[in-house]
Amino acid sequence: MMMPSVFSLTGRVAILLIGGASGHMIMNSPTPYNLNIQPLLQVDPLSGDSYPFPCHNQYGFTTRTLVEAGGSTLVNFTGGGQHGGGSCQFSITYDEPVNGGDWNKSAKFKTIYSIIGGCPAVFTDETHNLAPVAMDKNMRQDSQHCGNDSGIDCIRQFMVPIPKFLKNGPATFAWTWFNKLGNKEMYM
């Protein structure tokens, strides 16, 4: 009988940009790189040298999430800029971040789960973004949460299945997002 594999998962972010410094979104679970440590997680789309793939070349963390292959992990978000929703992909890499910018030259991410439409939110009208209702501890705006993956006019959360064939060991979990409304950009 084979033992299920367990690997540590360090969340990466897809980030949603809508304008000012307070109206953005980040993945907060699993804990992404640089969520609460300096330099704080950036909230801009991927853009060459300024915010390179992957994840703006961020790699600082204080928490790793342990996940069992064949199980699932909760993905949740914080923010006030949903750009009318969109589509998300969740990926894994076993490549380790390297200081000095070499991370983006070697990382190979494999998509393990996709959500086409309705991520991170769905709206009853052409609303671009939900009104902010709170702030997180780093003063990021947050909007109403659904607490599930099917709510409307709220930020959804998702249970993302982790394939049972994944190997044990440190891994990086990435969320990428393509917005429905506004400039067509890729956020991570």
Image (cartoon, rainbow, N blue to C red):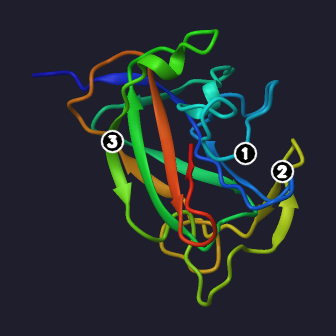
Q: What element carries label 2?
A: loop
Identify which residue is drawn at 67% across, 21% down: 61
From the viewer's perspective, tell me whether residue 107 is left or right of residue 154: left
Q: Which residue lies furthest to the bottom in this view?
A: 125
Instruction: Report the residue marked by disc 2.
Output: 140
What is the secondary structure assignment of the residue under circle 3? strand
Where residue 72 appears, as percent x and y from the top left, is 38, 44
Circles 2, 1 touching at the beta carbon (< 8 Å): yes
Using the rendered view, name the quadrant where residue 92 is placed. Answer: top left
**Mark 2–mark 3 distance (CA, rounded to whole Å):** 28 Å
Instruction: Give the labeled residue for mark 1.
Output: 43
* Mark 1 burial class by Cα count in 10 Å: few <14, some 14-19, many 20+: many
| Local SS, label 1 | loop
Q: Which amino acid does label 3 sit on?
A: Thr
Q: Position of residue 69 (x, y in %)?
A: 30, 32
* Residue 97 pos. (x, y %): 53, 15
**Seen in the image, is 145 located left or right of residue 36?**
left
Type of the residue with mark 2: Arg
Vertical placement of residue 133 versus 55, above or below: below
Mark 1 to mark 3: distance in Å? 22 Å
Q: Name the residue under label 3.
A: 111
Image quarter in which the N terminus is found: top left
**Three-letter amino acid code at disc 1?**
Val
* Lower sequence index among marks 1 and 3: 1
Q: Residue at x 61, y 90 (%)?
A: 125
Q: Nearer the viewer, mark 2 or mark 1?
A: 1
Give the alpha-carbon distance from disc 2 to disc 1, as whole Å.
10 Å
Left-right relation of 3 to 92:
left
